[in-house]
Image (tube, rainbow, N blue to C red):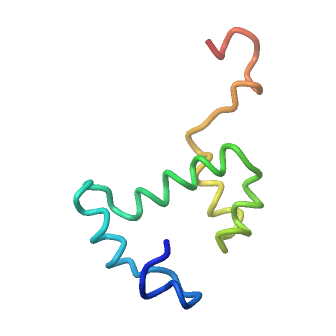
Amino acid sequence: MVTRGTRARTTPASVAYVSHVLDPGGVPPRMLRSTRLVDLVNTMDPKLVAAAFGMTAERVMIYLADRVDPGRLPAGWAE
């Protein structure tokens, strides 16, 4: 997220700023990040996501815990 204060630097927007922007929608920054990570981990290689976000592969795998790839299920289970 680029703000007036971060546009000339390489530092990220502060959590306080992001919280303030998201307050009207009732969405905490953590939920926004989690939703984004779940989508990326489920559509890309989790190791690439971990490297891109500076996380360990084990930490990223948490976002796969509640998902089963329908292609890995026996025929008839995915319906």
Say left or right for 67 vs 74: left
Query: For residue 36, what is the image quadrant?
Result: bottom right
Say left or right for 58 vs 14: right
What's the residue at 77%, 52% (across, down)?
A: 45
Q: Quadrant of the C terminus?
A: top right
Say left or right for 5 vs 51: left
Query: For residue 59, what is the image quadrant?
Result: bottom right
Q: Position of residue 65 (x, y in %)?
A: 59, 45
What's the residue at 64%, 51% (across, down)?
A: 40
Residue 1 higher or lower than 6, as above or below: above
Residue 26 higher or lower than 20, as above or below: above
Query: For residue 32, what is the image quadrant?
Result: bottom left
Q: Position of residue 66 (x, y in %)?
A: 55, 40
Q: Position of residue 17 (x, y in %)?
A: 34, 77
Depth check, front residue: 23 or 72 = 23
Q: How many marks?
A: 0
Say left or right for 76 vs 34: right
Q: Position of residue 22 (x, y in %)?
A: 31, 62
What's the residue at 41%, 63% (across, down)?
A: 30
